[in-house]
């Protein structure tokens, strides 16, 4: 099972901290999973110009190909100006419309204010749904007050991340079994 | 129709096309050498010619997993190896080529083939050709429109005066050699969306419509939009042929045909397009209302006649070699086309 984590911003530390914790939890609990964490701050990714993702060079090609090869994705995002950051939206724009078909996608959201709680619900989920993802309905929402100097300091956040990892893996494994059983019925 | 060398009295034309993909056979994991793939493409054209198939065309793709980038060179070999079959590109990516050079090449192939050659000009769905050949992807639309227009002008006039943005001007330029019959049939390659077909209608050129899967009725909208645009621009749709292109394979039953073809198409699309073909969509290809021609000969004949009723098209071209299909399977298809499909299609579509 290939799992790809995305830290969807090139600035700040909270999303990176939350995603590092999420990926570490996943690796501890599912040592057989093939896990990759992509921190967008470490890559030079160009803006989408509409071409097939395979036709981009360099980092853009690497990141999009890695996402396309995943069985499940955990997308980490901060909230900027009451929305997802442009860097993350650009990743979606780079991919084909049905890029997340047969993939499970879950979300980890960091924000400066509790007022942003529904942004993922109202803005991120519709994009994932449009791109045909099997979306894990629960997401982890982490506020400013849960961090201190780039570390998570609220125990409940650790528990919520653990549950998110488990639910993502259960959904991904279940979906794979279901898909396999359905595909076998076609007889080709 | 005569201008495009189509005779409706002989019924709908049946052709074969290859994109020139060079992929491993997913069943065995083995990829034949490029030399063998090219040899087999020429051999396939020969078999099609001998079987009485009307048309054979070769595509141009500048990507990994392809081998007919120099498609006009391949067509030249096919021109030499065949007798009666019409030959063409499917398609020539005119956007990133020089129309003068393309015309020289295709007029030459036409002379070698003694007047059997056509050009289908497209825009490319993958865009590796832009970087490779030194063009800017931002000019994608304009490059195509301008160069396609120049190609048409060269076809209509032996001496060309032309000014444009993407190529040096031409002053009293004579583009030689001239084709066997004085001009070449030139078609516009059209994808799923009607807007490209509408442009073809406005400029009064015939269309080749690519149809991978989905309802015939959806593609019919594109054909209708094309004919409406022809009328709006003052042309008579009865003078402009329409051709469709799509996946094709024959086996004893439709279930068997799908089984024999799915892994080639699915794995091939993963490699060349970055996404596979979902099984649920592929399975729906068996439905009579779906454009995909993968099934038993009897079912495919019925589907093709249904498509003809809906589109009123003059030519169908079949893609049967995509994704590393072994040559033995292609040979079997050609035999069945010749003995079962072709006679029935011709009989029921010939205009009295």
Image (tube, helix red, strand yellow):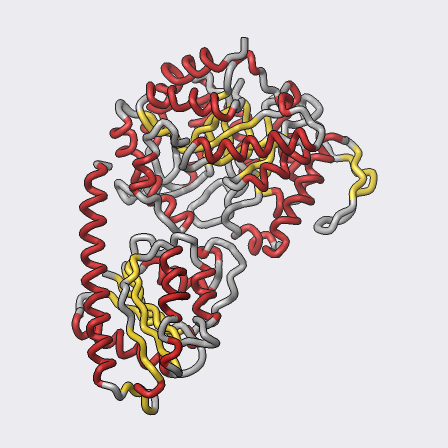
Q: Is residue A1 left or right of residue B221?
A: left
Task: Count the labels in the image.
Answer: 0
Give the residue drawn at x 28%, y 60%. A104
Determine whether B221 is above or below A44 in the image: above
Q: Residue furthest bottom?
A: A149
Nearer to us in this view, A90 or B145: A90
Determine whether A8 is above or below B1 in the image: below
Residue B299 on image: x %, y %: 33, 22
Quadrant containing the N terminus of chain B in the rendered view: top right
Q: Is residue A71 left or right of residue B164?
A: left
Nearer to us in this view, A134 or B352: A134
Q: Is residue B262 left or right of residue B185?
A: left
Q: Residue furthest right?
A: B172
Residue B218 on image: x %, y %: 47, 35
Give the residue drawn at x 63%, y 39%. B199
Residue B10 on image: x %, y %: 53, 13
């Amino acid at each position: 099972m290939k799992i790809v984590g995305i830290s969807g911003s090139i600035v700040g530390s909270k999303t990176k901290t939350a995603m590092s914790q999420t990926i570490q939890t996943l690796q501890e609990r599912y040592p057989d999973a093939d896990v990759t964490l992509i921190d967008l701050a470490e890559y030079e990714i160009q803006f989408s110009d509409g071409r097939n993702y395979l036709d981009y060079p360099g980092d853009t090609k690497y990141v999009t190909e890695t996402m396309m090869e995943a069985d499940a994705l955990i997308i980490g995002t901060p909230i900027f100006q009451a929305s997802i950051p442009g860097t993350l939206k650009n990743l979606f724009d780079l991919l084909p419309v049905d890029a997340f078909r047969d993939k499970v996608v879950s979300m980890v959201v960091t924000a400066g204010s509790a007022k942003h709680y529904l942004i993922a619900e109202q803005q991120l989920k519709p994009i994932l749904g449009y791109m045909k993802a099997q979306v894990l309905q629960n997401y982890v929402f982490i506020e400013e007050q849960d961090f201190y100097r780039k570390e998570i300091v609220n125990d409940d956040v650790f528990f919520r991340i653990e549950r998110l990892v488990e639910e993502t893996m259960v959904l991904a494994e279940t979906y794979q079994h279901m898909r396999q059983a359905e595909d076998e019925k076609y007889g080709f | 129709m005569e201008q495009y060398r189509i005779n409706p009295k002989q019924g709908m034309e049946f052709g074969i096309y290859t994109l020139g993909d060079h992929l491993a056979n997913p069943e065995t994991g083995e990829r034949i050498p490029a030399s063998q793939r090219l040899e087999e493409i020429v051999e396939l054209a020969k078999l099609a010619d001998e079987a009485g198939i009307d048309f054979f065309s070769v595509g141009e793709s500048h990507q990994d997993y392809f081998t007919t980038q120099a498609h006009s060179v391949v067509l030249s070999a096919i021109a030499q190896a065949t007798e009666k079959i019409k030959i063409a590109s499917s398609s020539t990516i005119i956007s990133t080529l020089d129309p003068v050079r393309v015309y020289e090449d295709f007029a030459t192939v036409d002379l070698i083939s003694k007047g059997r050659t056509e050009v289908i000009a497209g825009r490319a769905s993958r865009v590796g050709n832009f970087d490779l050949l030194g063009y800017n992807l931002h000019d994608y639309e304009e490059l195509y429109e301008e160069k396609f227009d120049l190609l048409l002008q060269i076809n209509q006039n032996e001496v060309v005066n032309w000014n444009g943005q993407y190529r040096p001007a031409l002053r009293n330029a004579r583009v030689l050699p001239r084709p066997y019959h004085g001009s070449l049939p030139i078609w516009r390659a059209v994808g799923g969306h009607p807007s490209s077909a509408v442009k073809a209608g406005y400029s009064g050129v015939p269309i080749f419509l690519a149809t991978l899967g989905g309802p015939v009725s959806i593609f019919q909208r594109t054909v209708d939009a094309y004919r409406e645009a022809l009328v709006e621009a003052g042309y008579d749709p009865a003078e402009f042929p329409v051709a469709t292109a799509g996946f094709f394979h024959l086996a004893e039953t439709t279930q068997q045909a799908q089984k024999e073809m799915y892994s080639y198409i699915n794995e091939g699309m993963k490699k060349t397009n970055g996404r596979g073909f979902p099984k649920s969509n592929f399975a729906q290809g068996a439905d009579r209302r779906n454009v995909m021609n993968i099934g038993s000969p009897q079912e495919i004949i019925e589907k093709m006649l249904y498509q003809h009723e809906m589109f009123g098209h003059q030519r169908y071209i079949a893609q049967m070699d995509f994704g590393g299909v072994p040559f033995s399977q292609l040979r079997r298809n050609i035999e069945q086309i010749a003995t079962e499909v072709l006679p029935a299609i011709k009989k029921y579509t010939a205009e009295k």
